[in-house]
Amino acid sequence: MQGHISGTYVRLLFEWLNEKGHHAEQVLQRPCPELDERIRIPFEEWRVMLERTYQITQDPFFGLEVGSRITPRHLGVLGYVSYSCNTLGEALLRLQRFEDLVHAVNDMKVNFDGDLILLQWGAELGVTGEFADQTAQSVLVSYVRYLISPDFSPVWMSFINPTPSNVKPYEDFFRCPVKFESNMTTMAFPAMWLAKPVAKPDPVLRDILDRQAESLLQQLPANDAFVDALRQAIHAAIHAATPNLDIVAMRMHCSPRTLQRRLDERGLKFQILLDDARLQLAKRYLSKANTSLSEIALLLGYAEQSAFNHAFKRWTGATPKTWREKNSSMVI
């Protein structure tokens, strides 16, 4: 299976095994990685390490305990930048943007279902497996609790994997109903949590770390003609109300498949580039008091204002109206 995870993330498993009295390096048959997100562990090797852990512990729910140990240092720059954000919404936006620094397998998708936010993972690159998903979702929920409140609980969870012999350990850990054999692995929680403040926001440090994370993520030459042309094509597609990969590929004079391959070569994601472009334009339009929210939605290629409102709140943790009121004097 394709994909990789960072050395900082893998250390969670080493530390947990050592705490349980096992010699982690012997069990996992490799040295403990340094706390450096630049260290990449192929996902298949991670899956082997999880299987070895199960063989030595015979605990089918060990991933819940491993994930509960999460701290910012295990997520590297992504951990520290999210910990410096103002709200959970801001932190989750960084998680989506910089996810590949830590866990580059199937992409996280963010959707709305009424008043609920859905964080979802499919199986585009393959099914990651029970232990990997168990650990990853435990990390996510535990880290949200770390950031904003130990009282945080999803409304429901679902996993792609088969139903285990005992669901109760999942329900006890996540404090909500948990379904299995679903089309997507999903964490659903009330949208109102997006506005919850992070314990220790630091906007100055956040901006510094944003830049550092961006540099680590992209690792592109200083001048990349392809990326420059791609961003121009995305902006043009937004203005033409056709912001999708097929149309952008046509503007780039290549097939969608070729465009996707070139994005993959650079570690870039089309949806994240599109969201970034829309966010920049949205802030520019919102700084102009004479442009209505419905007009801005149309200018950004949304068929409905509600879709724009949901997207903007996901990006910033605030509605467009609230953001405009707080930044009315800002010039972009």
Image (cartoon, rainbow, N blue to C red):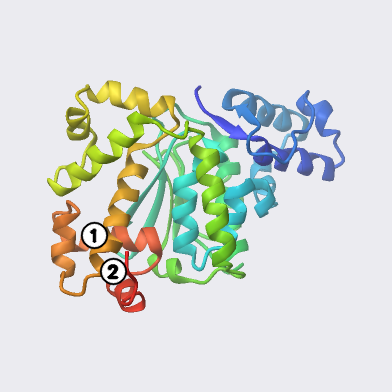
Using the rendered view, name the quadrant where residue 232 is placed.
top left
Q: Is residue 113 visible?
A: no
Whole-percent x and y of residue 247?
17, 34
Along the horizontal axis of the image, is 256 left or right of 197?
A: left
Q: 287 or 270, which is in the foreground?
A: 287
Seen at 51% across and 34% down, the residue is 219
Dots 1 and 2: beta carbons under 8 Å? yes
The C terminus: image quadrant? bottom left
Q: Quadrant of residue 13?
A: top right
Q: Secondary structure at mark 1?
A: helix
How many numbered marks have been drawn onto this rendered protein structure? 2
SS at mark 2? helix
Taking depth in this image into account, of 15 and 285 the one nearest to the observer is: 285
Q: Quadrant of residue 225?
A: top left
100 up-or-down from 328: above or below:
above
**Label of residue 38 in the image:** none
Q: Which residue type does callout 1 highlight?
A: Phe
Residue 320, label in figure: 2
279 lies left or right of 93: left
Residue 268 is situated, as x and y percent measured from the top left of the image, at 41, 34
Q: At which x and y percent is residue 256? A: 24, 25
Q: Badge 1 is on which residue? A: 308
The location of residue 185, given as percent across then percent down, is 44, 43
Q: Residue at left 68%, top 41%? A: 8
Q: Amino acid at mark 2?
A: Pro
Q: Which residue is depicted at the point 30% across and 45% down?
A: 274
Q: Is residue 54 left or right of residue 126?
A: right
Task: Please determine whether, in this image, residue 64 is positioned above or below residue 86.
Answer: above
- Taking the image as shown, residue 322 lies to the left or right of residue 59, namely left
Marks 1 and 2 sit apart, C-alpha to C-alpha, by 8 Å
Is residue 130 in view from this perspective? yes
Residue at 60 percent across and 52 percent down: it is: 79
